[in-house]
Image: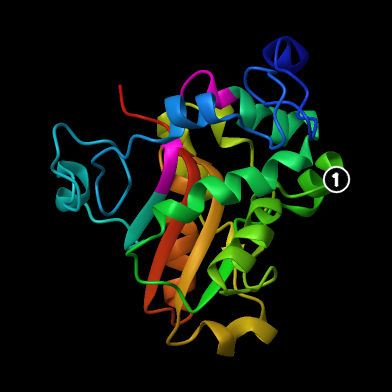
Amino acid sequence: MMQQLLKGLPLALPSSCALCGAEHRSALCEGCRSQFFSTRKARCACCGIPLPGEAGGVRCGDCLKQPPAFDATIVATDYLPPVDRLVLALKFGNQLELAPMFAQMLHPATKGMMLPHLLTAVPLGPQRLVQRGFNQALEIAKPLSRNLRVKLEPHLVARHKETHAQAKLHPDERQKNIRNAFVVPAPAMQRVQGRHIGVVDDVMTTGETLNELAATLKRFGAVRVTNIVFARTPQH
C-alpha cells in the first residue's frame, strides 16, 4: 500500500526536483518552491492551524477554549498534495536526502520567533526505530539545529511506551494511545529545567503527540515549549 502511495514521486536526486522531477541543482526547483512554499498563511500562534483572512498571530477558538500544553507552533507548509508525498518519501521511502530540504523550508518560518534554548525531536519507541532504521524528526532536527544555531539534544525526551501509529487511529483513540508515553531521562532533567524547548517533527495532525510531549517537558520544569513542524494537517 505504501509503495502505491509513493508511486509517481520522482527520486530526490541531487540533479532533480523532488516534486516535479525537473533538472535542478537542489532538491526543490524554483517553480515548486514558489508554488508550494512562498505563500505565508495566517496561522494560529499556538497550534499552527490555518486561519481565515490575515488574522495570524492570534489563537484559534480551540486553543482559547482548551489551551494545549505547548505554547507555540511553527509550520513550513500544509500537509496536502503534493507536499504530503515528500513527507511519505522521507518517512517510508528512506529518502533521507529530503530532511535537509525540510529544515531549509522551516528556517524562514522561524524568523521573528523566540528561539528556544534547546532543540529536540519527537522520539520513536525502540521497536519502531529498529523497524524504520532512523527517526525522521531527528533527521530534520539535525540540519535545522545548525541553521538556527540552537543546540540539539536528541535524548532530552524518551518514549518509554510503545504506541500505535497515531495516523491509523480514530481521533477519539489518539489521546489514550499517547498518554504517559514520554519521560525525561534522569541525565537530561537539569537541562530541561527553566528552559525553552523546541520540539521538531515532520507532521502535526491532531497535535495529541506534541501536546503529551510538551506536558511531559513542563512536568520536568520546562518553562516554554514550541513545536517546529514541517507540515500541518488542516482541519476539515
Viewer-nearest residue: 7 or 132: 7
Viewer-nearest residue: 171 or 92: 92
Label 1 packing within 10 angstroms: few (<14), some (14-19), many (20+) = few
Magenta-highlighted residues: 75-84
Residue 78 visible in image: no
Determine the residue positioned at 68% across, 18% down.
22
Q: Which residue is mark 1?
A: 133
Residue 167 on image: x %, y %: 55, 30
As drawn, 129 above or below 174: below
Viewer-nearest residue: 236 or 147: 147
Q: Is 42 left, or right, of 65 in this rendering?
A: right
Residue 82 visible in image: yes
Q: Is 168 left, or right, of 161 in this rendering?
A: left
Determine the residue positioned at 63% across, 29% down.
86
Residue 181 on image: x %, y %: 59, 56
Residue 140 on image: x %, y %: 65, 52
Q: Residue 80 in magenta?
A: yes
Viewer-nearest residue: 110 or 118: 110
As drawn, 22 above or below 66: above
